[in-house]
Image (spheres, rainbow, N blue to C red):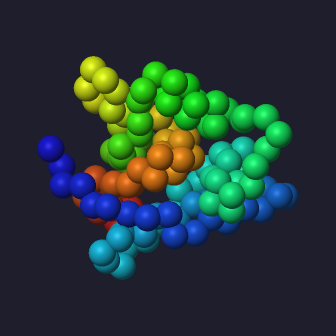
Amino acid sequence: MDRMVEVELSRIIINDNADQQFIFLREKDGVREFPIVIAFLEAMAIDRHINAKQTQRPLTHELLHSVLQGLEARVIRVEVTKLESSTFYANLVVRHPGGEIAIDARPSDAIAIGLRDHAPIYVHEDVLEDVAAH
């Protein structure tokens, strides 16, 4: 298995007039940082959680987190697994009473949900190398 590097969400850039928003992931014990382009709704979900802004009713990421809690499951980590044709891929790794499962997800969704469980974010070393090469 590839070496995993722990990263943290270092910045989020939201532009109300653009379709593309950006989150930046920075190596926790290093200097490498890279952006991931995400959609407006996912950027707002991440921003709302970071800034502890509540909505009157649960939105999609809050709903999924509540479903996981109801099933006695918890997000234990987010893994950014590959970069292919300028698209990042990720897994939401969930622990439940029967074990662990890795669920394919967009990085933005995985991060938006994982933040609610304070789950660490990891990036495969080869993804960091691919990002540095571009």
How many numbered circles are shown?
0
Among the 4 quarters of the image, the one containing residue 7:
bottom left
The answer to which of 128 and 12 lies nearer the viewer is 12
Relative side of 86 to 101, left or right: right
Is 25 positioned to the left or the right of 61 in the image?
A: left
Which residue occupies 79% across, 44% down? Answer: 55
Would you say residue 40 is visible in this rendering? no
- Where residue 19 sits in the image (x, y, percent)? 75, 50
Q: Nearer the viewer, residue 97 or 18?
A: 97
Q: Where does residue 78 sit, x and y in percent of width and height?
A: 39, 46
For this rendering, which residue is in front, 1 or 74?
74
User: Left or right of 12: which side holds 89?
Assistant: left
The picture places residue 117, in percent across and down from the top left corner, at 47, 46
Which image quarter is the C terminus in? bottom left
Position of 112 relative to 12 (above/below): above
Q: Residue at x 34, y 27 (%)?
A: 96
Left or right, 89 with reference to 57 = left
Q: Is residue 8 above or below residue 119?
A: below
Image point (68%, 62%), residue name: 51
